[in-house]
Amino acid sequence: MSIVELESVSKWYGTEQVLYGLSLEIVAGERVVFLGPSGCGKSTILRLIAGFIAPDKGGIYLSGEIVSRDGCIIRPPEERGVGMVFQDLALWPHLSVKGNIEFGLKAKGMEKNDRQRRIEAMLELVGMIAYAHRKPGELSGGQQQRVALARALVLEPKVLLMDEPLFNLDLELNVRLRREIVELQEKLGFTMVYVTHDKDEAIEVATCVVTMKNGRLTD
Amino acid sequence: MVVPILTLFIQAGGIDAYAEALRRAGASLQRSLVYSVIGATLLSITGFFIGYLIHTRALCGWRLVDSLTILVFALPGTVVGIGLVSLWNTPWTNFIYATPMIILLGYLAKYTALTSRITVTTLAQIPPSMEEAAQVAGAGWFRRMGLIVAPLARRGLITGWLVGYVFSLRDTAITMLVYPAGYETLPVRIFTLMANGSAPLIAALCVIMIAATLLPAGILGVLSVGMTKEVRA
């Protein structure tokens, strides 16, 4: 069964159309990468799935349930159980690494002991256990990247959206983190929807590459 | 700029004038401080909500709301005051009009533009992904505002509070028109005492007014110096 489905989705920003009747299904457990030049509408797809914006036409389904349709957001982002890693990572600068990861667990109302265990397991998994009390500003680019991943994954999302997450890193680190991301996904089994403009990155990360141009899928 | 303030100091002279000032206007000073602190807090909260709605364009007609708050701010206080009197001076609304709440309403009506504008410029400096990340983490609006957006916007919020305090404290035109008998604030008291009070008394009251204006900024300054020292240590 498809875990994410877009049904003839069109989107305009003002008078400019950015998506043209897009339909696609993403199967659970896949690593789908949208590949295309900037402005082709690939980030818009992530924002639609996350629920920050609604499709002007068409519908979006998560695990078979309708979440947005024809200009309306039926389920807001906080109720979709979808994780996201942002292009600028969006780590909260006033919270420690632990605080960043803990935020979503607290919002869920999880007990302190359970939170503590989950956070430690997650930090262990991304190799950041020694940095729990640092602020994001005191970390290197690669470390920040790992914290952003941990913050999203600790909530055990069924779908993880990643918007050019390795954009700001040098090539060596970029290549290393691609592998780490793939390993994490294989270990945890979440569905991944990944956006990049880099062909090599796409091929290395994906189990399925979708190419895009001017708001349409290309083959 | 410094000359008139210096003149006031000299004119007030010794401790006697200040003692006399506090004896005759101490209650007004106290009221002024209380109303301004409450006013600034209400202004900060209202300004944050309106500013947030303007910032996210969530309010249909946000442009209208924005322009209206600025218009009311631009109007002379007397006009706003007279408007408030005609609106609230009815038997049914006496529970507000006959209490200091009407003064606070006046502050809110006139000065919300300041705090909402400060909120808008502050929020514009915070990347939208900060709030979006909290949203996908499952946090509802109040949690997002309280734990993510407000802490990131704290400088702007503190500035807004201080501006709200200063403007509430110094307001004369609206307060003079709407204050219920026996509830006059310090600027109004100074104004009425000017008719028959002695020059040193008035000067002393003005100096007290200056001190009251600088008070919260001073407290904040001391606190922030203390905090920087702590961080360094």
Image (tube, helix red, strand yellow):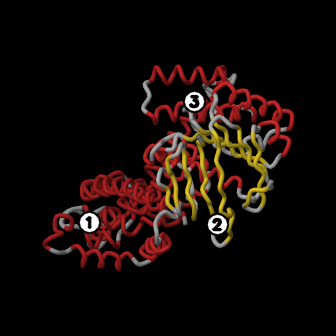
Q: Are marks 3 and 1 in contact (CB under 8 Å)?
A: no
The numbered mark, 2 or 3, whose residue comes first in the sequence reads 2
Q: Which residue is mark 3?
A: A154
**Residue A170 placement (x, y as % from top left):** 84, 38
Residue count near mark 1 (Cα–Cα under 10 Å), binned few <14, some 14–19, many ≥20: many
How far is disc 2 from disc 1 in space, using C-alphas? Answer: 45 Å
Taking the spot 25% from the left edge, 55% from the top edge, the residue there is B27
Taking the spot 65% from the left edge, 62% from the top edge, the residue there is A21
Callouts 3 and 1 on one subunit: no
- SS label for mark 1: helix
Toward the front, the furthest residue is: A1
Q: Which residue is mark 2?
A: A13
Up-down: is B120 above or below A179? below
Callouts 2 and 3 on one subunit: yes
Up-down: is B24 above or below A181? below
Q: Read off the chain for label 2.
A: A
Q: Which residue is mark 1?
A: B102
Camera-side residue of B141 and A23:
A23
